[in-house]
Image (cartoon, rainbow, N blue to C red):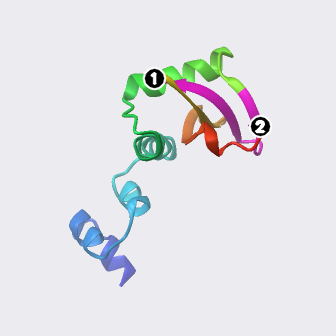
């Protein structure tokens, strides 16, 4: 059954009709993990901060982190680090993937437990 649902001939509409969520849609679209992380980052920025981020906006966040302009907050694991970055006029917490050099998600600063 699962193989039938995932076959390319069935396409996207079949999977969406099954009520599956965003995660599987990203896999089906052929995005790499880095691309999926950026997609997730954009979606969470829109959902949590009401900010629309384009390709240049993501590049600006990455530049802040890599140039040292972002404030380090905490290290979650060898791969993930949390930074306080400026997105537009707001500050937010960005979870950054050190191995892929990509932002993973973003959260409002109020969610931080200092």
- Front-most of residues 34 and 9: 34
**Residue 37 sits above or below residue 16 on the image:** above
Residue at horizontal 33 percent and vertical 53 percent from the top: 29
- Mark nearest the camera among 2 and 1 is 1
16 to the left or right of 41: left
Residue at horizontal 47 percent and vertical 45 percent from the top: 48
**Residue 112 sits above or below residue 17 on the image:** above
What x and y, as percent, mark residue 86? 55, 23
Magenta segment includes 76: yes
The residue tagged with tag 1: helix, strand or loop? loop
- Front-most of residues 9 and 55: 55
Find residue 74 and name its label: 2
17 to the left or right of 22: left
Image: magenta residue range: 72-88
- Front-most of residues 4 and 114: 114
What x and y, as percent, mark residue 93? 62, 36
What x and y, as percent, mark residue 87? 50, 26
Disc 1 target residue: 88
Residue at horizontal 29 percent and vertical 70 percent from the top: 15
């Amino acid at each position: 059954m699962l193989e039938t649902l995932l076959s390319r001939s069935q396409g996207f509409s079949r999977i969406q009709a099954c009520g599956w969520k965003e995660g599987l849609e990203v896999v089906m679209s052929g995005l790499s993990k880095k691309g999926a992380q950026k997609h997730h980052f954009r979606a969470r920025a829109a959902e949590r901060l009401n900010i629309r981020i384009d390709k240049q906006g993501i590049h600006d966040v990455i530049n802040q982190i890599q140039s040292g302009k972002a404030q380090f907050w905490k290290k979650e694991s060898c791969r993930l680090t949390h930074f306080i970055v400026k997105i537009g006029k707001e500050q937010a917490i960005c979870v950054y993937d050190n191995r892929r050099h990509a932002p993973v998600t973003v959260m409002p600063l109020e969610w931080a437990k200092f």
